[in-house]
Image (cartoon, rainbow, N blue to C red):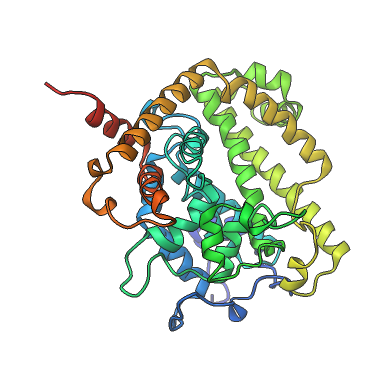
Amino acid sequence: MADGQKTSGAAKKAKASTPSTVYARPAKAPYATDFNCSHGRLYPEPDSRFRTPFERDRDRIVHSSAFRRLKGKTQVFVAHEGDHYRTRLTHSLEVAQIARSVARMMGLDDDLAETLGIAHDLGHPPFGHTGEDVLDTCMEGYGGFDHNAQTLRVLTKLERKYPSFDGLNLTWETLEGVVKHNGPLVRYGAALTDLPVAIQEYVAQHDLDLETWPGLEAQVAAHADDIAYNNHDIDDGLRAGLFTLAELREEVPMVARVLGEVEKDYPGLDQFRLVAETVRRLIGVWIDDLVWESGNRIAAEKPRSVEDVRAAGKPLVGFSDVMNEHQAVLRRFLMARMYRHWKVNRSRSHAKRILRELFNLLLAEPELMPPNWQQGGDGPKGQRTARRVCDYIAGMTDDFAIDEHKRLFTLER
Protein backbone atom coordinates (compact mmCIF):
# COMPACT_ATOMS: atom_id res chain seq x y z
CA MET A 1 0.00 0.00 0.00
CA ALA A 2 1.39 3.42 -0.98
CA ASP A 3 2.25 5.95 1.74
CA GLY A 4 -0.72 8.05 2.72
CA GLN A 5 -3.26 5.66 1.17
CA LYS A 6 -6.21 5.14 3.49
CA THR A 7 -7.15 1.66 4.63
CA SER A 8 -10.70 0.70 3.74
CA GLY A 9 -13.18 -0.32 6.42
CA ALA A 10 -13.27 -3.87 5.08
CA ALA A 11 -9.49 -4.09 5.20
CA LYS A 12 -9.43 -2.79 8.78
CA LYS A 13 -12.03 -5.40 9.76
CA ALA A 14 -10.07 -8.18 8.06
CA LYS A 15 -6.88 -7.08 9.78
CA ALA A 16 -8.59 -6.99 13.17
CA SER A 17 -9.94 -10.54 12.72
CA THR A 18 -6.58 -12.01 11.76
CA PRO A 19 -5.44 -14.38 14.53
CA SER A 20 -2.42 -13.22 16.48
CA THR A 21 -0.87 -16.70 16.37
CA VAL A 22 -0.77 -19.25 13.58
CA TYR A 23 -1.19 -22.94 14.39
CA ALA A 24 1.91 -24.94 13.51
CA ARG A 25 1.62 -28.66 12.98
CA PRO A 26 4.02 -30.55 15.28
CA ALA A 27 6.88 -32.34 13.57
CA LYS A 28 6.56 -36.10 13.21
CA ALA A 29 7.90 -37.90 16.24
CA PRO A 30 10.57 -40.60 15.73
CA TYR A 31 8.20 -43.19 17.26
CA ALA A 32 5.34 -42.37 14.86
CA THR A 33 4.40 -44.96 12.28
CA ASP A 34 6.20 -44.09 9.04
CA PHE A 35 4.29 -44.99 5.87
CA ASN A 36 7.60 -45.11 4.01
CA CYS A 37 8.53 -48.10 6.17
CA SER A 38 5.19 -49.89 5.94
CA HIS A 39 5.23 -53.69 6.05
CA GLY A 40 3.10 -53.50 2.92
CA ARG A 41 0.00 -55.35 1.78
CA LEU A 42 -0.73 -59.07 1.57
CA TYR A 43 -1.09 -58.71 -2.20
CA PRO A 44 1.59 -56.32 -3.55
CA GLU A 45 0.30 -53.27 -5.43
CA PRO A 46 2.04 -50.30 -7.04
CA ASP A 47 2.21 -47.23 -4.80
CA SER A 48 -0.03 -44.27 -5.50
CA ARG A 49 1.61 -41.16 -6.88
CA PHE A 50 -0.67 -38.86 -4.89
CA ARG A 51 -1.70 -40.62 -1.68
CA THR A 52 0.17 -42.31 1.13
CA PRO A 53 -0.62 -45.99 1.81
CA PHE A 54 -2.68 -45.02 4.87
CA GLU A 55 -4.67 -42.46 2.91
CA ARG A 56 -5.47 -45.16 0.36
CA ASP A 57 -6.59 -47.46 3.18
CA ARG A 58 -8.90 -44.77 4.51
CA ASP A 59 -10.39 -44.11 1.09
CA ARG A 60 -10.99 -47.80 0.41
CA ILE A 61 -12.86 -48.13 3.70
CA VAL A 62 -14.97 -45.02 3.03
CA HIS A 63 -16.00 -46.44 -0.36
CA SER A 64 -16.82 -49.89 1.04
CA SER A 65 -20.34 -51.29 1.34
CA ALA A 66 -19.79 -52.13 5.00
CA PHE A 67 -19.00 -48.50 5.81
CA ARG A 68 -22.17 -47.27 4.13
CA ARG A 69 -24.26 -49.74 6.09
CA LEU A 70 -23.06 -48.24 9.37
CA LYS A 71 -25.61 -45.45 8.87
CA GLY A 72 -28.34 -47.99 9.67
CA LYS A 73 -26.65 -49.61 12.66
CA THR A 74 -27.04 -48.18 16.13
CA GLN A 75 -25.29 -48.56 19.47
CA VAL A 76 -28.05 -48.08 22.04
CA PHE A 77 -31.22 -47.11 20.19
CA VAL A 78 -32.80 -48.98 17.30
CA ALA A 79 -32.54 -47.03 14.05
CA HIS A 80 -36.27 -46.38 13.65
CA GLU A 81 -36.55 -44.74 17.09
CA GLY A 82 -35.33 -41.35 15.86
CA ASP A 83 -33.18 -39.52 13.35
CA HIS A 84 -31.10 -37.57 15.87
CA TYR A 85 -29.45 -40.41 17.78
CA ARG A 86 -25.97 -41.44 16.82
CA THR A 87 -25.46 -44.37 14.49
CA ARG A 88 -22.34 -46.45 14.00
CA LEU A 89 -21.55 -44.23 11.02
CA THR A 90 -21.72 -40.90 12.86
CA HIS A 91 -19.91 -42.44 15.82
CA SER A 92 -17.12 -43.70 13.56
CA LEU A 93 -16.71 -40.26 12.02
CA GLU A 94 -16.55 -38.69 15.48
CA VAL A 95 -13.94 -41.21 16.60
CA ALA A 96 -11.92 -40.59 13.43
CA GLN A 97 -11.99 -36.82 14.00
CA ILE A 98 -10.84 -37.12 17.61
CA ALA A 99 -8.17 -39.68 16.72
CA ARG A 100 -6.83 -37.51 13.92
CA SER A 101 -6.67 -34.41 16.14
CA VAL A 102 -4.92 -36.21 19.01
CA ALA A 103 -2.48 -37.97 16.69
CA ARG A 104 -1.56 -34.66 15.07
CA MET A 105 -0.96 -33.02 18.47
CA MET A 106 1.31 -35.92 19.44
CA GLY A 107 3.32 -35.88 16.21
CA LEU A 108 1.93 -39.21 14.98
CA ASP A 109 0.62 -40.24 11.57
CA ASP A 110 -2.85 -38.68 11.65
CA ASP A 111 -3.92 -40.42 8.43
CA LEU A 112 -3.42 -43.83 10.04
CA ALA A 113 -5.17 -42.77 13.24
CA GLU A 114 -8.13 -41.47 11.24
CA THR A 115 -8.27 -44.66 9.19
CA LEU A 116 -8.43 -46.80 12.32
CA GLY A 117 -11.18 -44.60 13.74
CA ILE A 118 -13.24 -45.03 10.59
CA ALA A 119 -12.68 -48.82 10.47
CA HIS A 120 -13.09 -49.83 14.10
CA ASP A 121 -16.85 -50.62 14.06
CA LEU A 122 -17.23 -52.26 10.62
CA GLY A 123 -17.79 -55.70 12.14
CA HIS A 124 -20.64 -54.74 14.45
CA PRO A 125 -23.95 -56.47 13.71
CA PRO A 126 -27.37 -54.77 13.96
CA PHE A 127 -28.70 -53.72 17.38
CA GLY A 128 -25.35 -52.87 18.95
CA HIS A 129 -23.80 -55.08 21.60
CA THR A 130 -27.08 -56.96 21.94
CA GLY A 131 -26.66 -58.22 18.39
CA GLU A 132 -23.11 -59.29 19.13
CA ASP A 133 -24.18 -61.26 22.20
CA VAL A 134 -26.96 -63.03 20.30
CA LEU A 135 -24.74 -64.01 17.37
CA ASP A 136 -22.01 -65.24 19.71
CA THR A 137 -24.55 -67.48 21.45
CA CYS A 138 -25.98 -68.70 18.14
CA MET A 139 -22.48 -69.45 16.84
CA GLU A 140 -21.51 -71.52 19.88
CA GLY A 141 -20.08 -74.70 18.46
CA TYR A 142 -19.41 -73.00 15.12
CA GLY A 143 -16.47 -70.80 16.06
CA GLY A 144 -18.33 -68.04 17.91
CA PHE A 145 -18.74 -64.38 16.96
CA ASP A 146 -16.56 -61.41 17.89
CA HIS A 147 -17.11 -57.96 16.39
CA ASN A 148 -13.40 -57.20 16.25
CA ALA A 149 -12.67 -60.42 14.38
CA GLN A 150 -15.66 -59.68 12.15
CA THR A 151 -14.13 -56.31 11.27
CA LEU A 152 -10.99 -58.12 10.13
CA ARG A 153 -13.19 -60.54 8.18
CA VAL A 154 -15.00 -57.66 6.46
CA LEU A 155 -11.74 -55.95 5.52
CA THR A 156 -9.93 -59.05 4.29
CA LYS A 157 -12.66 -61.30 2.89
CA LEU A 158 -16.27 -60.10 2.74
CA GLU A 159 -15.74 -56.92 0.72
CA ARG A 160 -15.42 -58.19 -2.86
CA LYS A 161 -14.77 -55.36 -5.29
CA TYR A 162 -11.30 -56.00 -6.67
CA PRO A 163 -10.51 -58.39 -9.53
CA SER A 164 -7.37 -59.91 -7.99
CA PHE A 165 -8.30 -60.49 -4.34
CA ASP A 166 -11.07 -60.58 -1.76
CA GLY A 167 -11.19 -57.83 0.84
CA LEU A 168 -9.66 -54.37 0.58
CA ASN A 169 -5.98 -55.44 0.74
CA LEU A 170 -5.13 -52.86 3.39
CA THR A 171 -1.66 -52.25 4.79
CA TRP A 172 -0.21 -54.36 7.57
CA GLU A 173 -0.28 -51.36 9.93
CA THR A 174 -4.00 -50.73 9.43
CA LEU A 175 -4.91 -54.38 9.95
CA GLU A 176 -2.61 -54.58 13.00
CA GLY A 177 -4.30 -51.52 14.47
CA VAL A 178 -7.80 -52.87 13.83
CA VAL A 179 -7.07 -56.22 15.47
CA LYS A 180 -4.85 -55.03 18.34
CA HIS A 181 -6.21 -51.58 19.20
CA ASN A 182 -7.00 -52.80 22.73
CA GLY A 183 -3.61 -54.42 23.15
CA PRO A 184 -1.84 -57.73 22.43
CA LEU A 185 -4.07 -60.71 21.71
CA VAL A 186 -1.56 -63.40 22.64
CA ARG A 187 -0.34 -62.90 26.20
CA TYR A 188 -0.56 -64.28 29.73
CA GLY A 189 -0.20 -67.84 28.51
CA ALA A 190 -2.92 -67.57 25.87
CA ALA A 191 -2.59 -69.61 22.70
CA LEU A 192 -3.37 -68.65 19.13
CA THR A 193 -6.10 -71.31 19.13
CA ASP A 194 -7.92 -69.35 21.86
CA LEU A 195 -8.55 -66.49 19.42
CA PRO A 196 -11.56 -66.05 17.11
CA VAL A 197 -11.34 -68.22 14.00
CA ALA A 198 -11.25 -65.22 11.63
CA ILE A 199 -8.09 -63.92 13.31
CA GLN A 200 -6.44 -67.34 13.41
CA GLU A 201 -7.07 -67.86 9.70
CA TYR A 202 -5.76 -64.47 8.65
CA VAL A 203 -2.55 -64.42 10.69
CA ALA A 204 -1.68 -67.84 9.32
CA GLN A 205 -0.97 -66.11 6.01
CA HIS A 206 -0.18 -62.55 7.17
CA ASP A 207 1.41 -62.40 10.64
CA LEU A 208 0.24 -59.35 12.62
CA ASP A 209 2.56 -59.82 15.64
CA LEU A 210 -0.35 -60.48 17.98
CA GLU A 211 1.91 -60.66 21.05
CA THR A 212 2.97 -56.98 20.94
CA TRP A 213 1.25 -53.67 21.54
CA PRO A 214 0.24 -51.83 18.36
CA GLY A 215 1.63 -48.51 17.20
CA LEU A 216 0.61 -45.33 19.00
CA GLU A 217 -1.91 -44.41 16.30
CA ALA A 218 -3.95 -47.51 17.12
CA GLN A 219 -3.70 -46.78 20.84
CA VAL A 220 -4.93 -43.24 20.19
CA ALA A 221 -7.87 -44.51 18.11
CA ALA A 222 -8.93 -46.85 20.92
CA HIS A 223 -9.09 -44.00 23.42
CA ALA A 224 -10.78 -41.72 20.90
CA ASP A 225 -13.53 -44.33 20.85
CA ASP A 226 -13.92 -43.98 24.63
CA ILE A 227 -14.03 -40.19 24.41
CA ALA A 228 -16.64 -40.20 21.66
CA TYR A 229 -19.12 -42.68 23.07
CA ASN A 230 -18.83 -41.63 26.72
CA ASN A 231 -19.57 -38.00 26.01
CA HIS A 232 -21.99 -38.36 23.13
CA ASP A 233 -24.07 -40.90 25.05
CA ILE A 234 -24.70 -38.07 27.52
CA ASP A 235 -26.22 -36.06 24.67
CA ASP A 236 -28.27 -38.98 23.31
CA GLY A 237 -29.48 -40.03 26.76
CA LEU A 238 -30.69 -36.53 27.61
CA ARG A 239 -32.33 -36.16 24.20
CA ALA A 240 -34.17 -39.46 24.69
CA GLY A 241 -35.36 -38.47 28.16
CA LEU A 242 -33.68 -41.46 29.82
CA PHE A 243 -32.23 -39.22 32.51
CA THR A 244 -32.30 -35.55 33.40
CA LEU A 245 -29.68 -32.85 33.60
CA ALA A 246 -30.33 -32.62 37.33
CA GLU A 247 -29.58 -36.35 37.79
CA LEU A 248 -26.42 -36.04 35.72
CA ARG A 249 -25.28 -33.02 37.74
CA GLU A 250 -25.93 -34.78 41.05
CA GLU A 251 -24.25 -38.09 40.26
CA VAL A 252 -21.31 -37.24 37.95
CA PRO A 253 -19.02 -34.60 39.52
CA MET A 254 -16.89 -33.98 36.43
CA VAL A 255 -19.96 -33.22 34.35
CA ALA A 256 -21.34 -31.03 37.15
CA ARG A 257 -18.13 -28.98 37.19
CA VAL A 258 -18.07 -28.36 33.44
CA LEU A 259 -21.81 -27.70 33.38
CA GLY A 260 -21.35 -25.07 36.08
CA GLU A 261 -18.59 -23.39 34.07
CA VAL A 262 -20.84 -23.16 31.02
CA GLU A 263 -23.71 -21.71 33.09
CA LYS A 264 -21.32 -19.14 34.54
CA ASP A 265 -20.06 -18.13 31.09
CA TYR A 266 -23.53 -18.09 29.51
CA PRO A 267 -26.24 -17.28 32.10
CA GLY A 268 -29.74 -18.22 31.03
CA LEU A 269 -28.62 -20.42 28.13
CA ASP A 270 -31.36 -22.73 26.83
CA GLN A 271 -30.90 -26.43 27.61
CA PHE A 272 -30.16 -27.53 24.06
CA ARG A 273 -27.20 -25.15 23.75
CA LEU A 274 -26.22 -25.77 27.37
CA VAL A 275 -25.89 -29.50 26.78
CA ALA A 276 -24.11 -29.06 23.45
CA GLU A 277 -21.54 -26.69 24.93
CA THR A 278 -21.03 -28.91 27.97
CA VAL A 279 -20.40 -31.99 25.83
CA ARG A 280 -18.05 -30.01 23.61
CA ARG A 281 -16.01 -28.88 26.60
CA LEU A 282 -16.04 -32.35 28.14
CA ILE A 283 -14.51 -33.77 24.97
CA GLY A 284 -11.79 -31.11 25.27
CA VAL A 285 -11.11 -32.08 28.89
CA TRP A 286 -10.73 -35.73 27.94
CA ILE A 287 -8.46 -34.94 25.00
CA ASP A 288 -6.23 -32.66 27.09
CA ASP A 289 -5.85 -35.38 29.72
CA LEU A 290 -5.07 -38.03 27.11
CA VAL A 291 -2.37 -35.93 25.46
CA TRP A 292 -0.85 -34.91 28.82
CA GLU A 293 -0.78 -38.41 30.32
CA SER A 294 0.46 -40.02 27.11
CA GLY A 295 3.21 -37.42 26.86
CA ASN A 296 4.34 -38.34 30.38
CA ARG A 297 4.40 -42.04 29.55
CA ILE A 298 6.32 -41.51 26.33
CA ALA A 299 8.83 -39.25 28.09
CA ALA A 300 9.42 -41.92 30.73
CA GLU A 301 9.76 -44.78 28.23
CA LYS A 302 11.80 -42.79 25.65
CA PRO A 303 10.91 -44.85 22.55
CA ARG A 304 13.01 -44.05 19.51
CA SER A 305 10.97 -45.95 16.95
CA VAL A 306 7.60 -47.57 16.42
CA GLU A 307 9.28 -50.91 17.14
CA ASP A 308 10.25 -49.58 20.58
CA VAL A 309 6.56 -48.79 21.10
CA ARG A 310 5.55 -52.34 20.18
CA ALA A 311 8.23 -53.80 22.44
CA ALA A 312 7.39 -51.60 25.45
CA GLY A 313 5.25 -54.29 27.02
CA LYS A 314 2.65 -51.74 28.12
CA PRO A 315 0.43 -49.05 26.60
CA LEU A 316 2.04 -45.65 26.11
CA VAL A 317 -1.27 -43.90 25.40
CA GLY A 318 -3.88 -43.58 28.12
CA PHE A 319 -5.80 -41.43 30.56
CA SER A 320 -4.53 -40.34 33.94
CA ASP A 321 -5.67 -42.17 37.08
CA VAL A 322 -7.89 -39.21 37.93
CA MET A 323 -9.59 -39.31 34.53
CA ASN A 324 -10.03 -43.07 34.76
CA GLU A 325 -11.87 -42.53 38.05
CA HIS A 326 -14.11 -39.94 36.41
CA GLN A 327 -14.71 -42.34 33.53
CA ALA A 328 -15.73 -45.11 35.91
CA VAL A 329 -18.27 -42.82 37.60
CA LEU A 330 -19.74 -41.74 34.27
CA ARG A 331 -19.97 -45.31 32.97
CA ARG A 332 -21.73 -46.48 36.12
CA PHE A 333 -24.23 -43.65 35.68
CA LEU A 334 -24.83 -44.44 32.01
CA MET A 335 -25.13 -48.16 32.73
CA ALA A 336 -27.79 -47.62 35.37
CA ARG A 337 -29.66 -44.71 33.79
CA MET A 338 -29.31 -45.44 30.08
CA TYR A 339 -28.02 -48.84 28.97
CA ARG A 340 -30.27 -50.68 31.47
CA HIS A 341 -33.22 -48.30 31.25
CA TRP A 342 -36.50 -50.20 30.96
CA LYS A 343 -37.26 -48.67 27.56
CA VAL A 344 -33.86 -49.74 26.23
CA ASN A 345 -34.38 -53.19 27.80
CA ARG A 346 -37.58 -53.58 25.78
CA SER A 347 -35.81 -52.74 22.54
CA ARG A 348 -32.97 -55.09 23.49
CA SER A 349 -35.41 -57.92 24.20
CA HIS A 350 -37.13 -57.41 20.86
CA ALA A 351 -33.79 -57.33 19.04
CA LYS A 352 -32.72 -60.60 20.66
CA ARG A 353 -35.82 -62.40 19.45
CA ILE A 354 -35.48 -61.03 15.92
CA LEU A 355 -31.85 -62.10 15.48
CA ARG A 356 -32.23 -65.45 17.24
CA GLU A 357 -35.24 -66.40 15.11
CA LEU A 358 -33.54 -65.20 11.93
CA PHE A 359 -30.42 -67.24 12.65
CA ASN A 360 -32.26 -70.44 13.53
CA LEU A 361 -34.49 -70.25 10.47
CA LEU A 362 -31.71 -69.47 7.99
CA LEU A 363 -29.46 -72.14 9.48
CA ALA A 364 -32.23 -74.71 8.98
CA GLU A 365 -33.22 -73.34 5.55
CA PRO A 366 -30.20 -71.57 4.01
CA GLU A 367 -31.98 -71.58 0.66
CA LEU A 368 -34.03 -68.64 2.00
CA MET A 369 -30.96 -66.40 1.78
CA PRO A 370 -30.15 -64.53 -1.46
CA PRO A 371 -28.34 -66.77 -4.00
CA ASN A 372 -24.93 -65.18 -3.47
CA TRP A 373 -25.09 -66.16 0.22
CA GLN A 374 -25.97 -69.81 -0.41
CA GLN A 375 -22.54 -70.87 -1.68
CA GLY A 376 -19.03 -70.89 -0.29
CA GLY A 377 -18.11 -70.27 3.30
CA ASP A 378 -15.14 -70.96 5.53
CA GLY A 379 -14.16 -73.59 8.04
CA PRO A 380 -14.99 -77.28 8.30
CA LYS A 381 -17.97 -78.43 6.28
CA GLY A 382 -20.32 -78.47 9.27
CA GLN A 383 -19.52 -74.83 10.07
CA ARG A 384 -19.79 -73.31 6.60
CA THR A 385 -23.53 -72.76 6.54
CA ALA A 386 -23.50 -71.31 10.06
CA ARG A 387 -20.72 -68.88 9.15
CA ARG A 388 -22.53 -67.79 5.99
CA VAL A 389 -25.70 -67.16 7.98
CA CYS A 390 -23.70 -65.26 10.61
CA ASP A 391 -21.97 -63.10 7.97
CA TYR A 392 -25.33 -62.39 6.31
CA ILE A 393 -26.98 -61.29 9.55
CA ALA A 394 -23.95 -59.37 10.83
CA GLY A 395 -24.00 -57.21 7.71
CA MET A 396 -27.63 -56.20 8.16
CA THR A 397 -28.75 -52.76 9.30
CA ASP A 398 -31.29 -52.53 12.11
CA ASP A 399 -34.17 -51.78 9.76
CA PHE A 400 -33.19 -54.48 7.28
CA ALA A 401 -33.11 -57.08 10.07
CA ILE A 402 -36.57 -55.97 11.23
CA ASP A 403 -37.93 -56.06 7.68
CA GLU A 404 -36.30 -59.41 6.88
CA HIS A 405 -37.83 -60.89 10.01
CA LYS A 406 -41.26 -59.62 8.94
CA ARG A 407 -40.82 -61.05 5.45
CA LEU A 408 -39.88 -64.47 6.80
CA PHE A 409 -42.22 -64.74 9.78
CA THR A 410 -45.29 -62.65 8.89
CA LEU A 411 -47.76 -63.92 6.32
CA GLU A 412 -48.88 -60.86 4.38
CA ARG A 413 -52.45 -60.77 3.09
- Please, is residue 370 above or below residue 106 in the view? above
Tell me if residue 16 can be seen.
no
| Residue beneath the point at 24% across and 31% down | 408
Q: Which of the 4 image quarters holds residue 276?
A: top right
Q: Position of residue 336 (x, y in %)?
A: 64, 21
Q: Position of residue 380 (x, y in %)?
A: 43, 55
- Please, is residue 166 above or below residue 260 in the view? below
| 389 horizontally vs 346: left or right | left
Q: Position of residue 3 (x, y in %)?
A: 58, 76
> How many circles with numbers are drawn on the protein?
0
Q: Which of the pair 71/271 is nearer the observer?
A: 71
Q: Which of the pair 406/201 is nearer the observer?
A: 201
- For the C terminus, the quadrant is top left
| Residue beneath the point at 29% across and 30% down | 405
Q: Which of the 4 image quarters holds residue 213?
A: bottom right
Tell me if residue 40 can be seen.
yes
